[in-house]
Image: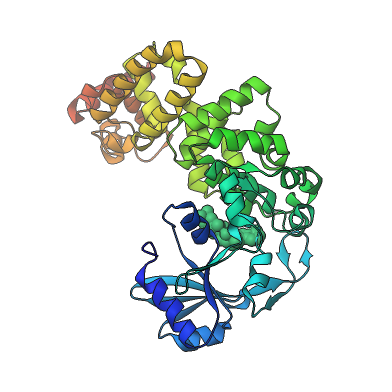
Amino acid sequence: NADIPRPVLDVLRRLRELGFAVFLVGGCVRDMVRGVPPKDFDVATSAHPHEVQGGFKKVIPTGIQHGTVTVVIGGTHVEVTTFRSEGDYHDGRRPSTVTFESDITEDLSRRDFTINAMAYDPLSRELVDPFGGQTDLQARLIRCVRDAHERFSEDGLRPMRAVRFAAVLGFTIEPATQAAIPPTLPVFRKVALERVREEFVKLLLTPRAEFGLTLLAYTGLLDVFLPELARAEPEAARQARAAAQAAPAEVEIRLAALLADLVSGSQAKDIGVQLKFPTKVAETVGLLVEHARLEARTEEGDPALRRLLAKLGLGSLESLLAVAHARIQVRAPERLPDFLRLQERLRALAAAKPPLSAKELALTGGDIMATLGVGPSPIVGQATRFLLDSVLDDPTLNQSERLKEMLRTWQAGKGS
Ligand code: ATP
Ligand code: MG
């Protein structure tokens, strides 16, 4: 019980005082039984949402129609959900009805996997484990509560969660549970892509991403939301998975490492958009994929590398280096020394903070117009590009007098 925060215990005690059944449920019980500190604590109770609201000073009606409220206590937020069972499912997406229950076992029986279907009462130290969650934790197995085929047909996201938990925990999917995945893929196809993406990201960011991705491919799930990887040649797919796992655990970096040798930058961005990533994330992935093949650039001079920095933006350099490093480690380890030299050069060029865009030029648009003796016109754009191009070649040119002189020469050359 030492792991359980004081406010959570206070919520449990208060509801018990009011005469309700109340337990910790879900991921936190799984983690405590495994002996790892839980991330967050979910409370389940026989009290109805309005009864929970009546029991505490501050309660936010987070998802009251599903029975969830958030108790704010001692500066922490504790989610409290009424025991419930779920009616029929429409489209494998969400239950058509939610019924409140008075019995914890009813509530546990709607949960996805045996290891997620245990409840713990820290006040009496009773563990409620009707589906063999402890045994499966011991055996390191992901097993559906009740019939796998039925449960996957109810909610098409569950197979994806099975693979996600297998990867995160390093567990095996129990054979009957795994066998129920391919026949229920049509239900998985109907699941909203943002729900799929949330599980996918958790899988991608684990130290066992490669294993998780392999399992996604093997079960057929991957083909539904990432056919570009699912349909790649076996060796290309293997390298892509290994590169993803070799990269630091940040979503843009791992996704770019995964896709870099399978699709173009713009395709990678489109994949990000389709998977409902925030636009910024999709764009970053696209940019990283576009420039990921740094092993091809080890012979380039500083001007070319500065142009790369200009396209990339200094803020993304470290991410790009991480993507390239992971890919090269997997695909061409013999080129690592060359890559590491290039990495140092790129870092040194970036550290010198060279002018990389028009707004960093020592002349403003107004200065350029005055020097050329013209008003706003297309020639100003041409002149700006000329100056930026010169300065990317040689940043020491970026002084107003030098640039003015160059502009005059450029103008004279154009006239002749
Ligand atoms: P994590 O540590 O990744 O948050 P978790 O077990 O807390 O793991 P959540 O997705 O937060 O996972 O879900 C909380 C609990 O709700 C689960 O442990 C499970 O009991 C139940 N649950 C969540 N999603 C489903 C689902 N699609 N079908 C059935 N039960 C589910
Ligand atoms: Mg959770």
Residue 114 placement (x, y as % from top left): 64, 56
Q: Nearer the viewer, residue 174 or 334?
A: 174
- Location of the N terminus by quadrant is bottom left
Residue 304 placement (x, y as % from top left): 38, 18
- Residue 17 position (above or below residue 196): below
- Residue 240 position (above or below residue 80): above
Relative to 66, 384 lies left or right = left
Relative to 277, 182 lies left or right = right
Q: Is residue 300 visible?
A: no
x 70%, y 42%: residue: 221
x 38%, y 41%: residue: 376
x 49%, y 85%: residue: 53
Residue 367 placement (x, y as % from top left): 25, 37
x 42%, y 24%: residue: 325
- Location of the C terminus by quadrant is top left
Q: Nearer the viewer, residue 55 or 265?
A: 55
- Residue 175 position (above or below residue 2): above
Relative to 158, 23 lies left or right = left
Relative to 99, 377 lies left or right = left
